[in-house]
Image (cartoon, rainbow, N blue to C red):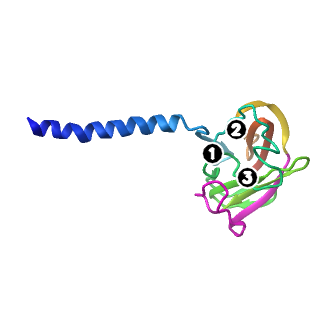
Amino acid sequence: MKRKHFFLIPLSLLISFGIFGFNYAQERPSPTREVSGSIGNTDVKVVYGSPGVKDRTVWGEVVPYNQLWRTGANEATTIEVGSDVMIQGQTLPAGKYSLFTIPKENSDWVVIFNKVEKQWGAFDYDQSEDAMRIMASPAKADFNERLKFEIDEAGDNEGKVKMYWDNLMLPIEIRTR
């Protein structure tokens, strides 16, 4: 009889940890989101932490101008391309990259594809590991409380990865071969 109860203790602990762990993931202030799509014949995936505006001034305060930003919250945002792509005339090899930006107040932003995919924020960012840097023009957009990414296929071999947050949209144009 005692042996039957002995097995209930580990089982109840596993169930408890599973339930509490599940609730913690759902209650994360900037939940992890993922978006996948295709541009031409290439699969594209973006994984990011999705912070909220929460009645704050985002651009210039929460996200300072002229400073490296992880382009999301928590872990650095990652972008994965299934085959080599062209971005502003440069080839980005197939693979997974951390995606950083340097926001500018009144000009194009710097968009950085860094070869070190697993990073917490931008604390250990190393510029020597950059695979590519491009410039992208932000535009006004409808208000978005939470940061989000979309993948839009514009034509046979071209499309955009778009970041939306607050009243801004940042497009990254991608061409496949």
Few, some or many residues within 10 Å of mark 3 (<14, 14–19, 20+)? many
Q: Quadrant of residue 15?
A: top left
**In the depicted structure, whether residue 60 falls above or below residue 146:** below
Question: Would you say residue 126 sits in the magenta stretch?
Answer: yes
Image location (x, y in percent) of residue 127: 72, 66
Label placed on residue 48: 1
Q: Amino acid at mark 1?
A: Tyr
Does the magenta run of residues contain 174? no
Q: Residue at x 39, y 34 (%)?
A: 19
Mark 1 to mark 2: distance in Å?
Answer: 9 Å
Report how many numbered discs are placed on residues in the image. Answer: 3
Report the amino acid beneath label 3: Trp
| Left or right position of 159 against 117 | right
In the foreground, 113 or 68:
68
**Contact, mark 1 vs mark 2 (Cβ under 8 Å):** yes
> With respect to residue 49, does 125 lie above or below?
below
Residue range highlighted in magenta: 115-137
118 versus 144 height, above or below: below
Residue 47, given in percent of the width and then of the height, sits at: 61, 46
Identified by mark 2, the residue type is Leu
